[in-house]
Amino acid sequence: MIFNRRTFLGTSAVAAASLAAPMVRAQGKPRVIVIGGGAGGATAARYIAKDSKGAVDVTLIEPTRTYYTCFFSNLYLGGIKEIDDLGHSYGGLAAGGVNVVHDWAVGVDRDAKTVTLAGGGSLPYDKLILSPGIDFVDGAVDGWDLSAQNAMPHAYKGGSQTELLKAQLKAMPEGGTFAMVAPPNPYRCPPGPYERVSMIAHYLKANNPTAKIIVADPKPKFSKMALFQEGWNNHYAGMVDWIGEDFGGGEVSVDPAAMTVTIDGEETKVDVCNVIPAMKAGRIAEIAGVTDGNWAPVNAIDMSSKADPDIHVLGDASQQGDMPKSGFSANSQAKVCANAVRGALTGSKVFPAKFSNTCWSLIDANDGVKVGATYEATAEKIAKVDGFISQTGETSDVRKATYEESEGWYAGITADMFGASV
Amino acid sequence: MRAFRFLMPLAVAGVMSLPCQAEIGDAEAGEKVFQQCKGCHQVGAGAKHRSGPHLNGLFGRQAASLDDFKYSKSFQRAGAGGLEWHAETLDVFLENPRAMTSGTRMSFRGVKDPQDRAHLILYLRQFSDNPADIPEADPTAQAVDHDLDPAILALKGDPEYGAYLSGECTTCHQAAGSDEGIPSITLWPEDQFVVAMHAYKTKKRNHPVMQMIARRLGDEEIAALAAYFKDLEN
Ligand SMILES: Cc1cc2nc3c(=O)[nH]c(=O)nc-3n(C[C@H](O)[C@H](O)[C@H](O)COP(=O)(O)OP(=O)(O)OC[C@H]3O[C@@H](n4cnc5c(N)ncnc54)[C@H](O)[C@@H]3O)c2cc1C
């Protein structure tokens, strides 16, 4: 694929002119604001700051002081990782020259090119990068809304929700029932709900072996299905009841006060209920006016918004084509975007877009599987080039090596997002 | 880039498919070739581990699978990744041990002459259970392509391009160089990097993620990455 450098000429010319002209702005540097310090945003902020060596002023807006990864949060539910293993501070980014502002972005004025903060005040930008992750679609699961998230947690954003679900799991009575309402496509981390089922089964097998797991799923099939089903049969025989679309898994309502789940007309009393509703781009993308439907369409070549060339949208919030919504994907997209944004603002060389993703999932302790693909930018979308998936019936050695590899990946991606661990 | 010994004279490249042909070598000649291995490896009745594992029953065995030998991490990964010893895999390994497993403790440059390797492989085959039943070309063995064009090794990589491309590596391989679960690629000698990536491309190295990543990297891109990682400072 040939990258069309002209796409950026307009803006680089402007940036170059303003660099040469007397300084109008603070320090006269081009300004990038990144909203959201997760897999996409932290990576983009870090790479722009690192690679521009101070030539670009990078501000990251993120409300939390510790980012708890969703990735590996299922392993925490399974008792394989501790919550502290999942927390990362922003100290490494600040040390790397990123100006970290702990606040919510509540407004974007695209004409004035400013971002408004919940704490008051607004910040100007030349380029704005949005990586706000997901929010839930209102009314997606009958009987559930955000006010029910304590009774029936989603645990699909990192941190306190994950801890709440774990506490409920621990408090489950002997022989109790855990229910999951799985989300419709597209959603973040396609294998995530099923890795969660595996890890919860792993926990229950050791701590509450007569407990049951019911999954109501609006989909007829899911990511790595053959691998998960093989694993559930091998490790957790008789424990997991997956009800797919064909059996009414999409006909679900819940009653958080009564702790009941009704699937295809049949009501069941449950002890823990994990509702993972349909998802959409984090609210701020909609506020910025870059969404179309639930997601923010982008140009594959540089992740720029189709609605505004000075806004880029990364990760889960973007609608880009074939890549799954994963931390790996967000990190990969962030580097393509960082390269393009830096090029536009400083005139540095812009290389062709290249994306990749691998998602590891853990089925039981030391029983890891993976699926991955490479992608390229076409005029319409990010398009899949090539891929692979773990096979059923692999030896335990292969599975253990895959798990160990996923641990290496976790250390790798978090270092890549946040810089040297602090 | 300095001359690289992985390469063989082009004239003998045609003999490369040797292990697939009927007569691949001569065990007696192989015993002579084995002299250079003896310092570290024993084979035959009563063979024990020395600094390298004994080599009895090697054929059809998963790499790094003897319980009582402490293998390098690199070999453990290769074994877990499905590397098995057959005529073809041994041929690739013996030619340049580090092309297959960068971190092997086997500090041996390799047997460069394909005919010598064929002799050696035949010699070693005698110490497996049913030598006569061991096919000279297993259907399961990996395709072998030793031909790494000298022009590929001579390419000068652009480190700036490498820096950009490295983003695809550092999602998993830490720039600071950690070797837990995923091997370090920081400060890797340029030639070894190039050989290894081409070995993934041609499936001599056995890792689905790396094969996929390598498959779409052009020669220039591999050279660029090698040029970047070789002196990456943290
Ligand atoms: C259970 C589970 C398991 C997963 N496992 C994996 C895995 O194994 N591998 C993998 O690659 N991915 C995995 N994922 C997916 C991964 O977590 C997401 O795809 C990834 O985090 C997306 O990155 P992002 O930057 O789009 O969003 P996020 O990482 O969610 O970051 C968004 C950030 O934006 C901030 N934010 C939101 N709105 C605002 C605002 N208005 N102002 C300021 N800040 C704001 C949030 O606080 C948050 O920190 C998993 C997800 C789940 C739920």
Image (cartoon, coloured by chain):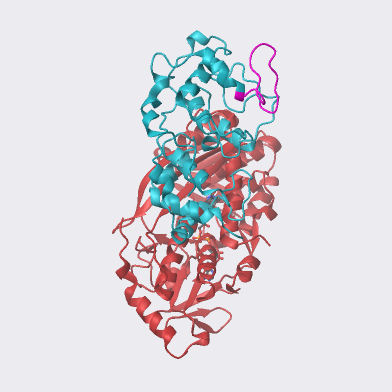
From this view, report whether residue A3 is shown above or below residue A222.
below
Nearest the viewer among B146 and B80 is B146
Secondary structure that dominates the magenta span: loop
Residue B180 lies in what quarter of the image? Answer: top right
Would residue A102 appear left or right of B92 to someone viewing this image? right
Nearest the viewer among B100 and A126 is B100
Could you tell me which residue is drawn at 37 percent across and 76 percent down? A12
Nearest the viewer among B58 and B211 is B58
Residue A299 lies in what quarter of the image? Answer: bottom left
State which chain is coloured cyan: B
Where residue A174 sits in the image (x, y, percent)? Answer: 70, 38
Would residue A359 appear left or right of A112 to someone viewing this image? right
Where residue A46 sits in the image (x, y, percent)? Answer: 55, 66
Instruction: For the N terminus of chain A, give its image quadrant.
Output: bottom left
From this view, report whether residue A407 is shown above or below residue A37.
above
**What is the magenta range?**
B36-52
Nearest the viewer among A128 and A175 is A128
Q: Colour of chain A?
A: red
Q: Is residue B43 on the magenta stretch?
A: yes
